[in-house]
Image (tube, helix red, strand yellow):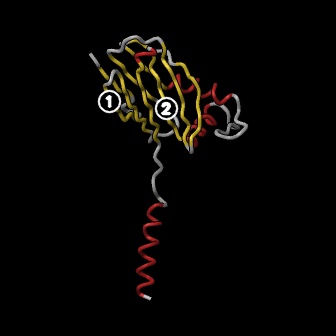
Amino acid sequence: MKSFNYYLLLVVVPLLAFTTAHKYYVSITEVHYVKEKESVQIITRIFIDDLEKLVRARFDESITLAVKNESEKVDFYLEKYLTEKMKIKINGKDAVLQFIGKEYEDDVAICYIEIPKIDHISEIEVQNLVLFDIFEEQQNVVRLNINDKKKSFILFKENDKGLLKLD
């Protein structure tokens, strides 16, 4: 009986510890400069359930993401939100972000954004406010790859910008 109680303790206690686990709110954004195309290409990955909560709260409570008959409004909402909450300055000037589209992979929405007609980057500043208005604990990881220089930032509500100087 003692061995059964010991075994039960070893199995049950660790399982109970995970029931109070904190959910992490994180997105990952990659920013690449493709010199040959004179284009800054941005890929942002956001958990579908977090993004769905956002779309429902800000735009339309009836929206469901990643379903067969997804509303045609979803891309419009995502473009509006992402271009409002993600700001990029190149060489000290505000860049215009163009939402290209999105796809789903497992439990993640992958959104594609582009900044065309960029012939030179000496400095890039990224502000990423995505999901800060929904989740207090939100963190946005930003990975820059500009002119073979790489830099990563973890942005959160109190520190929402990252800067990379190249010259």
Q: Which residue is mark 2?
A: 44
Residue at position x 68%, y 37% in the image: 63
Where is residue 104, by image quadrant?
top right
Q: Nearer the viewer, residue 122 or 130?
A: 122
Location of the C terminus by quadrant is: top left
Q: Position of residue 46 (x, y in %)?
A: 51, 37
Q: Is residue 74 left or right of residue 114?
A: right
Q: Nearer the viewer, residue 77 or 149?
A: 149
Where is residue 155, by image quadrant?
top left
Q: Position of residue 40 (x, y in %)?
A: 44, 20
Q: Is residue 62 left or right of residue 45?
A: right
Location of the N terminus by quadrant is: bottom left
Callout 1 secondary element: strand
User: CA separation, marks 2 and 1?
Assistant: 16 Å
Q: Which residue is mark 1?
A: 151
Identify which amino acid the numbered label 2 is placed on.
Thr
Residue at position x 45%, y 32% in the image: 29
Q: Nearer the viewer, residue 39 or 9?
A: 39
Mark sitting earlier along the chain (2/1): 2
Identify which amino acid the numbered label 1 is placed on.
Lys
Near mark 1 (Cα within 10 A), the count class, few <14, some 14-19 or many ≥20, is few
Callout 2 secondary element: strand
